[in-house]
Image (tube, rainbow, N blue to C red):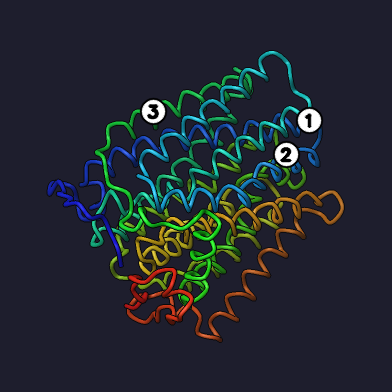
């Protein structure tokens, strides 16, 4: 599989469990991303809380969902751009746009523009700018570390999102009461500055090898979709990711519904409940980093899915918020196992010249799954949030049994994976493409 074309020299003093951090540019990228993504998770938690408080839970669900819809349009564009231009620069400009959008929301809140239309419009703009950069953020990893450190970098990349999920909602819950949601929105704006500075310190990397003869954006995305569909291993990781997105997105982006409907929680308890997901993920990430080399992708997902289902069942039946926090931490453990493994397998099965477009397919599926999951939890007042959580858990359990019966998870370990079968159409569009074979 493809990787960076320029030599990358690691710092040998860095422990093997975090070997990817031994590469200077990846270290800058990782550390600045932790700060920026923590700000983003603070922002999401505060926005959900404010909208629910001002306009009700149903409206908060609508705003959270509509902010994800732009993924359906802009993620394919971001993926195509990532495969034809220098990824660092593309991501840098996407982050600048996200910072300006965050500042606009903070300013609107401060001056009292708190209508549903204002929140929805800024959510759509933020979703658009964020989804342009999201495929690039995933694809850029291969420019920062060699193939030998790719799996470790994928786990670490998932870990930095986990740290953000741990700190973000908790900090938002603690700050909203004494300082107000406006403080949280401004903190998110400042956090983007840190990521911009981190990206500017990174060395120039050339665009992907075939960028010069890339197709038009629509044709480029279509060829990426065909490449993904024709790889059995990628088909498995995409479906698994879709299901994880469907179930996990409400827990991360619509946690106020669970907090209010299941536990009648205040802002502090809300922050702890949503933050528990991140803390569980962080503990899981440390375990995966420590023992990652002893596990196959199949073994990790076969552990993660049943654990995810068990945590959701526990959350559904928890009588008090303290037990709900524990159950959500278990969910976070499972989520981290699954996401780091699925992303690592996807990178391992993918040629670099298609990486941006494959990740745009990934983000597109998230853009479909996440709003569906959030809208389902928006029916909590009708169906009951506990029944919805139990239904999600049952979906995970059934999928795991079917995948195991069909042997689907065998395909996500590179030594067992069989790449896409080349045919005339694909070879015409990608004459020098290699078959994804391990």
Q: Residue at x 69, y 51 (%)?
A: 371
For residue 249, above or below residue 346: above
Q: In this view, does 76 lie to the left or right of 1?
A: right
Using the rendered view, name the quadrant where residue 363 is placed. bottom right
At mark 3, the secondary structure is helix
Q: Name the residue under label 3.
A: 194
Q: Marks 3 and 2, Cα distance to the nearest angstrom?
A: 27 Å
Q: Quadrant of residue 317?
A: bottom right
Q: Residue at x 74, y 19 (%)?
A: 113
Numbered mark located on residue 76 in the image: none
Q: Distance between the residues labelled 2 and 1?
A: 8 Å
Of residue 310 and residue 228, the one placed in the foreground of this image is 228
Q: In this view, does 309 lie to the left or right of 235?
A: right
Residue 323 visible in rendering: no
Q: How many labels does the image show?
A: 3
Mark found first going from the N terminus, 3 or 2: 2
Quarter of the figure that contains the N terminus? bottom left
Report the residue marked by disc 1: 116
- Could you tell me which secondary element the residue under label 2 belongs to? helix
Q: Mark 2 points at which residue?
A: 63
Q: Residue 396 in the image: x percent, y percent?
A: 62, 69
Decide: marks 1, 3 in contact (CB < 8 A)?
no
Mark 1 or mark 3: which comes first in sequence? 1
Considering only order in the chain, which callout, 1 or 2, is on the residue closer to the N terminus?
2
Is 306 left, or right, of 190 in this rendering?
right
The span from disc 1 to disc 3 (Cα, nearest Å) is: 30 Å
Tell whether label 1 touches label 2 (CB within 8 Å).
yes
Residue 428 position, x and y percent, is: 43, 73
Residue 37 versus residue 279 in the image, above or below? above
Please tell me whether mark 1 sits on a helix, a strand or a loop: helix
Q: Name the residue at 31% across, 31% down.
A: 200
């Amino acid at each position: 599989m493809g990787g960076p074309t320029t030599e990358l020299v690691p710092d040998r003093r860095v422990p093997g469990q975090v070997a990817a951090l031994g590469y200077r540019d990846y270290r800058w990228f990782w550390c600045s991303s932790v700060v920026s993504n923590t700000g983003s998770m603070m922002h999401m938690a505060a926005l959900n809380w404010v909208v629910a408080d001002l306009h009700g839970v149903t409206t908060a669900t609508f705003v959270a969902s509509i902010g994800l819809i732009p993924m359906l349009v802009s993620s394919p564009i971001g993926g195509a751009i990532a495969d034809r231009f220098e990824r660092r620069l593309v991501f840098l400009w996407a982050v600048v746009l996200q910072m300006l959008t965050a500042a606009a929301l903070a300013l609107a809140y401060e001056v009292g523009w708190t209508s549903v239309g204002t929140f929805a419009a800024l959510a759509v703009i933020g979703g658009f700018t964020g989804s342009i950069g999201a495929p690039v953020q995933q694809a850029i990893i291969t420019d920062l570390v060699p193939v030998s450190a790719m799996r470790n970098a994928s786990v670490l990349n998932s870990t930095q999102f986990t740290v953000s999920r741990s700190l973000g909602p908790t900090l938002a819950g603690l700050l909203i009461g004494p300082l107000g949601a406006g403080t949280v929105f401004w903190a998110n704006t400042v956090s983007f500055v840190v990521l911009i500075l981190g990206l500017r310190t990174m060395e120039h990397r050339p665009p992907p090898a075939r960028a010069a003869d890339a197709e038009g954006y629509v044709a480029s995305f279509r060829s990426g979709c065909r490449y993904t569909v024709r790889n059995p291993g990628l088909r498995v990781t995409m479906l698994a990711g879709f299901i994880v997105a469907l179930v996990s997105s409400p827990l991360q982006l619509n946690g106020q519904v669970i907090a209010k409907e299941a536990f009648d929680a205040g802002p502090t308890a809300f922050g702890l409940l949503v933050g528990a997901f991140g803390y569980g993920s962080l503990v899981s990430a440390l375990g995966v980093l420590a023992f990652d080399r002893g596990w196959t992708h199949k073994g990790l997902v076969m552990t993660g899915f049943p654990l995810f289902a068990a945590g959701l069942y526990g959350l559904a039946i928890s009588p008090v918020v303290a037990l709900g926090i524990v159950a959500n931490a278990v969910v976070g453990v499972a989520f981290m196992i699954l996401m780091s493994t699925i992303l690592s397998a996807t990178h391992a099965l993918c040629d670099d010249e298609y990486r941006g477009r494959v990740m745009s397919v990934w983000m597109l599926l998230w853009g479909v799954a996440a709003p569906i999951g959030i809208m389902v939890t928006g029916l909590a007042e009708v169906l009951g949030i506990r029944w919805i959580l139990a239904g999600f858990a049952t979906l995970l359990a059934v999928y795991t049994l079917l995948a195991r019966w069909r042997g689907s998870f065998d395909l996500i370990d590179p030594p067992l994976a069989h790449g896409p079968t080349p045919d005339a159409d694909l070879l015409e569009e990608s004459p020098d493409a290699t078959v994804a074979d391990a």
